[in-house]
């Protein structure tokens, strides 16, 4: 499999853990993997971008502009900022809930709605509300694993569901394992439900 996946968000959202799970799952399925992070003041809520390149065709850990098959954005303005990396026929999964990153200037009324509408007009896009998705788990901090379930459920991630589950069990601290598995399952089922609704409306 050859696939370039970019994950973007702000410090504290768990983008690095999500990329680590993807990279490890891909390696366990027999793929060559290159990965890297670009972090700007992450401890202060600055932008964080993770690159995961799967397959023998990748000679550099950094995805070139216009090279990403899948962009997973934990924050709307970060999705806009990194959209240039997405292929013309690529797929975007974006969290609709904004976190004002340090890279964003402007007023305090930023709600992410204009960014989401812009993204939907520019690419094949699935928008997910992290607060709604993670409500059963009491915290949006589980979104990083829940959105992996969503990506797996769309089929755009290209990795087996059970491989990802096994990596969550291996990587996540034991006291958080069951909650993260439940979040992953919720994200997976969310994607299936959206797909069923789209097919019903065709």
Image (cartoon, rainbow, N blue to C red):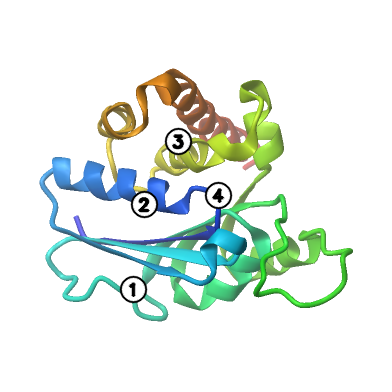
- Residue situated in front as seen by the camera: 21 or 101: 101
- The structure residue drawn at horizontal position 15% and vertical position 40%, both measured from the top left corner, is 28
Separation (CA) of disc 4 from disc 3? 16 Å
Q: Are marks 4 and 2 in contact (CB under 8 Å)?
A: no
Residue corresponding to mark 2: 19
Q: Mark 4 against mark 2, which lies toward the viewer?
A: 4
Count neighbours of disc 2 (C-alpha within 10 A) and say few if under 14, some if 14 to 19, many if 20 or more.
Answer: many
- The structure residue drawn at horizontal position 51% and vertical position 41%, both measured from the top left corner, is 147
Q: Is residue 72 visible?
A: yes
Tell me: 157 left or right of 57: right
Q: Of label 2 and label 1, which has the lower sequence position?
A: 2
Separation (CA) of disc 4 from disc 2? 12 Å
Q: Of label 4 and label 1, which has the lower sequence position?
A: 4
Separation (CA) of disc 3 from disc 1? 23 Å
In which quadrant of the rendered view does residue 159 lie? top left
Residue corresponding to mark 1: 63
């Amino acid at each position: 499999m050859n696939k370039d996946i970019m994950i973007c968000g702000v410090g504290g959202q768990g983008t690095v853990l999500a990329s680590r799970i993807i990279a490890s799952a891909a390696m366990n399925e027999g793929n060559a993997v290159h990965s890297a992070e670009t972090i700007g003041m992450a401890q202060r809520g600055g932008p964080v971008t993770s690159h995961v390149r799967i397959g023998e065709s990748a000679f550099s850990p950094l995805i070139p502009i216009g090279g990403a098959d899948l962009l997973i954005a934990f924050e709307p303005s970060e999705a806009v900022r990194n959209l240039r990396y997405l292929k013309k026929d690529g797929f975007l999964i974006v969290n609709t809930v904004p976190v004002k990153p340090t890279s964003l200037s402007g007023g305090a009324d930023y709600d992410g709605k204009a960014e989401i509408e812009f993204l939907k007009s520019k690419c094949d896009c699935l928008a997910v509300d992290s607060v709604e998705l993670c409500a059963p788990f009491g915290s949006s901090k589980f979104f990083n694993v829940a959105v992996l379930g969503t990506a797996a459920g769309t089929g755009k991630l290209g990795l087996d569901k059970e491989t990802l589950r096994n990596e969550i069990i291996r990587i996540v601290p034991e006291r958080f394992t069951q909650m993260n598995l439940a979040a992953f399952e919720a994200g997976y089922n969310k994607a299936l439900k959206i797909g069923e609704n789209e097919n019903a409306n065709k």
